[in-house]
Image: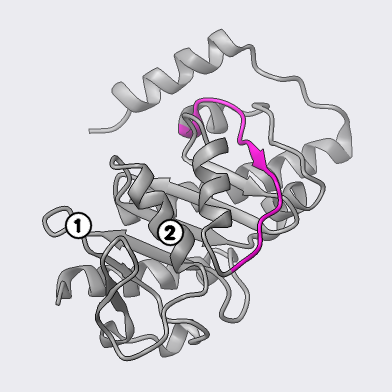
Amino acid sequence: MLESIRNELLKLHLILPASHLVTWTSGNVSIRDRETGLVVIKPSGIMYEDLRPEHFIVLDVNGKVIEGDLKPSSDTASHLYIYRHRPDVFGVVHTHSPYATAFAAIGEPIPVYLTAQADEFGGPIPCAGFGLIGGEDIGKLVVENIGQSVACLLKNHGVFTIGSSGKAAVKAAVMVEDVARTIWLARQLGQPAEIPPEMVEKLHYRYTHEYGQ
């Protein structure tokens, strides 16, 4: 089932270790099919280089396995919670990327110090509270705290990003880490100045409505 999504997920998962967003088997990407509403997600504990299209699991949004012999990701319930409560979301990514997770470790949101963050996220990247892995707790925290952003930190844990597609959610995960790394470097030199909210809004509008082809 959903062969094209399986093939896309295989490519998207390989971006995560290549971009230094995950270690060993941590992290995952899921995509919701626009036609059927079914969700395809990574199996639990499989090395990225060993993944094959047939390994991915197809579920409905309530968690019923439709196709797949392997155990789905331990974050599946949280992915599904996000999909059930955000009908606009068709891709979800979870990583433990080091610089962004450093902010999460101390429970600190990421203020808008960079135009790149204003462009991509349109505001600060929030940090939600602590939630246990394996159930819906983390998904609920993401839905309650992410606001208009496409990224949310989870205290003591890592990063969740969402998007209108799997690719968009992976891009957001890459950009969160890039922003967090740059801000960490800037703080070694001094205290960065936040961009005023009205400028953030203008930058985000330009990026989302005028930038690109």
Q: Quadrant of the N terminus?
A: bottom left
Crowding around mark 2 (Cα neighbors within 10 Å: few <14, some 14 to 19, many 20+) is many
Crowding around mark 1 (Cα neighbors within 10 Å: few <14, some 14 to 19, many 20+) is some
> Which of the numbered marks, if any, corresponds to residue 79?
2
Along the line of sight, which residue is nearer the eye, 103 or 88?
Answer: 88
Left or right of 156, for residue 158: left
Left or right of 158, for residue 146: left
Q: Quadrant of the C terminus?
A: top left
In the rendered image of this protein, does residue 71 appear above or below residue 4? below
> Which of the numbered marks, if any, corresponds to residue 3?
none
Left or right of 128, for residue 78: left
> Please, what is the three-letter code of the amino acid marked with disc 2?
His
Question: Percent x, y for residue 16?
Answer: 50, 66
Question: Percent x, y for residue 90?
Answer: 29, 51
Residue 149 in view, yes or no? yes
Residue pointed to by mark 1: 37
Question: Percent x, y for residue 139?
Answer: 51, 53
Question: Percent x, y for residue 27?
Answer: 54, 69
In the rendered image of this protein, does residue 154 appear above or below residue 179? below
Along the line of sight, which residue is nearer the eye, 83 or 14?
Answer: 83
* Secondary structure of residue under mark 1: loop
Along the line of sight, which residue is nearer the eye, 2 or 39?
Answer: 39
Residue found 58% across the figure and 74% down from its top: 26
In the rendered image of this protein, does residue 146 appear above or below residue 49? above
